[in-house]
Image: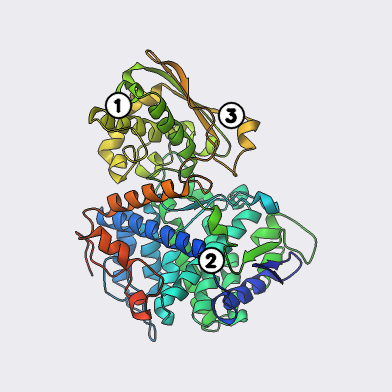
Amino acid sequence: MTVTGETRLLPADTNQARGLAEYAIDFLFRDPRPVGRATLGLLERFHLDSVGCGVSAIAQGANAPTVLRREALATPPMAGSRGAVCFGSPRRCLVERAVAANASAVREWDSNGTNFGYDAAKGRTAGEFGHNDYYPVAVAAAGEAGLGGDAALRLMLLIDEIRGRLAEVFALRKYAIDHVHHGAVASAAAFAAALGGSADQIESAIGMVVAHYVPFRAIRAGHQLSDSKGASAALSSEVAVMAARRALAGFVGPQDVFRNPLAIYRRNEPCAEGRSPFDLELGVGGDAFAIHSMHFKLGLYEHQSAGALQSLVDLFAAHPKLAADLDGIRTITVRIYEPAYSIIADPAKRTPQTRQSADHSLPYILAKTLLKARAASRSGAAADWESCMLLPDDYSEAAIRDTDIPALIENMSIVHGGRDYDDRYPEGIPTSVEIEHVALGRISAGLVTYPLGHARADVARTAAVVDLKFDRLVAGAVADPRALRERMRIGGKTPAEMAELYAFPIHGCDPG
């Protein structure tokens, strides 16, 4: 391994599992270099955003988080463990079960942060997806290890950095493997390191995750998606913590797993003996971290639809009469890139029956946004990101059955934009929307590449909408959203405060 400036390189011809173990120990304890204020501020915002999503999902009784939370609350900590808490309860639970429940809640709405695994400057463009789903692992590890808020932030950043850099160099989706695997590797390394694991133990934990617990994209197949889609990160977090515990207890997992010819990396991308398919470069200080290329969602929608949403918002601004006169729309033509075309424009997605399918349906997302724009126009408000923000109620059974939705979808055509669009992804989210309207004629906002929420979009404007999103998600779920916002400031918290971070009351939720 080589440390240069603010990064550490784990070359392909080295034991990268061991390298990740050493990196995790150094980053947390042996050589914790200062992290930039911009990085810490961004990390706090991503965490707060995830908490807003989780609180909302629990308060609204979303199925998977409710099932996993009930299971966790019924499972006491193992002997010698401090245990961990679930959102909305002070009860101490088995750590891995609490992690699964909390990660499931965070991920349920599919509305927290996203990465596309892309760093063109360094030629790392595998473009694997990923999300900031794993902060509950860091919070639980801090509570179990008696660490304060500053250490917990480093744990969160460590997880985001490992999974974010893996996403840049290895595209799991090409081999039908779910993107949450990168998060599981990162979670196992971070949890084991936080609890004082040796390099051998951390490497064993990583090896077990890679050898025993690889999730496939079967969870995302089918015309109507299930709880497994939203809970995938949660279940991978659970096994990552379990693997770390076993390694800390003395179980020895496979070593040097990234160069193992039968593990998922060399198995799918064969390379010379003694090498993995990629070099791995990781930030160690300053602002040299993958989190700066991660994106925010400004509501509940599959992030690859953000370009189309930005196109609509731009059209509403340029043509104020559009939102008020949806009946005048003759056709809507959306041009988009691969893989978005295959994922969210799949013909089966034109008639979603479940929320998990609707929030991955570009036709539904656009139709619902058009209807919200019309409602805003009728109330005298501008049709912008704030008034058109998609929230949980927009995916309720009643909303999905709204008879205005099929009528709008009927007029939509979604086409592959071709190589020009494909070449702009994953650096951007290239999309164009053209509407033929009875009164307005043929109108278009042109090609959108960096919609609001994207890492290269207006930072201050994005932050303002994300803050509004948090307030709307937790409204009615907690007594004082501002107090919750303050409670979630991680930096400077004591170990006791970190151990109880998520144990605040949620209205209508069983405290256990």
Tell me how many marks there are: 3
Label 2: which residue? 36
Q: Which residue lies at the image location 26% right of the left edge and 31% below the top edge?
A: 375
Q: Which residue lies at the image location 42% right of the left edge and 53% below the top edge?
A: 112
Camera-side residue: 76 or 31? 31
Which disc, if any, is residue 404? 1
Camera-side residue: 326 or 458? 458
Label located before the other in sequence (1 or 2): 2
| Element type where label 1 sits in the image | helix
Q: Measured along the vertical axis of the image, is residue 21 above or below residue 338?
A: below
Camera-side residue: 180 or 506? 506
Specify the quadrant that holds the N terminus: bottom right
Label 3: which residue? 417
Which tag is nearer the camera, tag 3 or tag 1? Answer: 3
Q: Residues within 10 Å of mark 1 (few under 14, many from 20)?
A: few
Where residue 179 appears, as percent x and y from the top left, is 54, 54
Q: Amino acid at mark 3?
A: Gly
Quarter residue 478 falls in: bottom left
Specify the quadrant that holds the C terminus: bottom left
Label located before the other in sequence (3 or 1): 1
Q: Are marks 1 and 2 in contact (CB under 8 Å)?
A: no
Q: CA distance from mark 1 to mark 2?
A: 49 Å
Q: CA distance from mark 3 to mark 1?
A: 27 Å
